[in-house]
Image (spheres, rainbow, N blue to C red):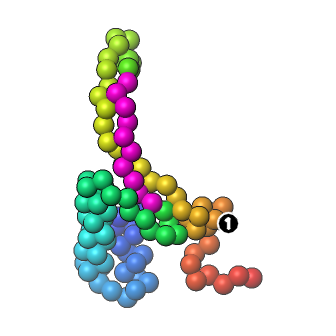
Amino acid sequence: MTKAELVDSISGEAELPKRQVGELVDMVLDEIRDALVKGDKVQLIPFGSFVVRERAKREGRNPKTGEKLTIAARRVPAFAAGKGLRDAVAAGGKKRGAKKK
């Protein structure tokens, strides 16, 4: 699913203009990004958590030449799925609000 498809889906379900939904999605993503830049953890229970992980400096190889090189330490964003998301995926991804048969 792309961002545009997400906006279309939410717009249809919430009966809101696509432009307004697009701005809201952008605001949510900006807030998540800003929190991660500050080093904060973002928890969206039961969906999951966004965190920043530290990667240590390590040795690597140039795949073309085989030459050894040092890969610098860095901070990387990571996502850990919450129980609700894991359970939904395991159950076949039934849409919220779907009635059980």
| Residue 84, percent from left and from top | 58, 68
Picture layout, residue 11 above or below residue 54: below
For the point 35% across and 13% down, the residue is 68
Tell whether position 92 is magenta. Answer: no
Q: Is mark 1 on a helix, strand or loop?
A: loop
| Residue 21, percent from left and from top | 30, 78
For the point 32% across and 42% down, the residue is 75
Q: Mark 1 points at which residue?
A: 91
**Callout 1 amino acid:** Ala
The residues colored magenta run 49-58
- Label 1 packing within 10 angstroms: few (<14), some (14-19), many (20+): few
* Image quarter hosting the C terminus: bottom right
Compare residues 10 and 47 and report the one nearer the observer: 47
Q: Is residue 33 visible?
A: no
Q: Residue furthest bottom?
A: 15
| Figure label count | 1
For the point 37% across and 31% down, the residue is 56
Picture layout, residue 61 above or below residue 28: above
Picture layout, residue 48 above or below residue 96: above
Quadrant of residue 12 in the image? bottom left
Compare residues 99 and 79 and report the one nearer the observer: 79
Q: Main secondary structure of the magenta part?
A: strand
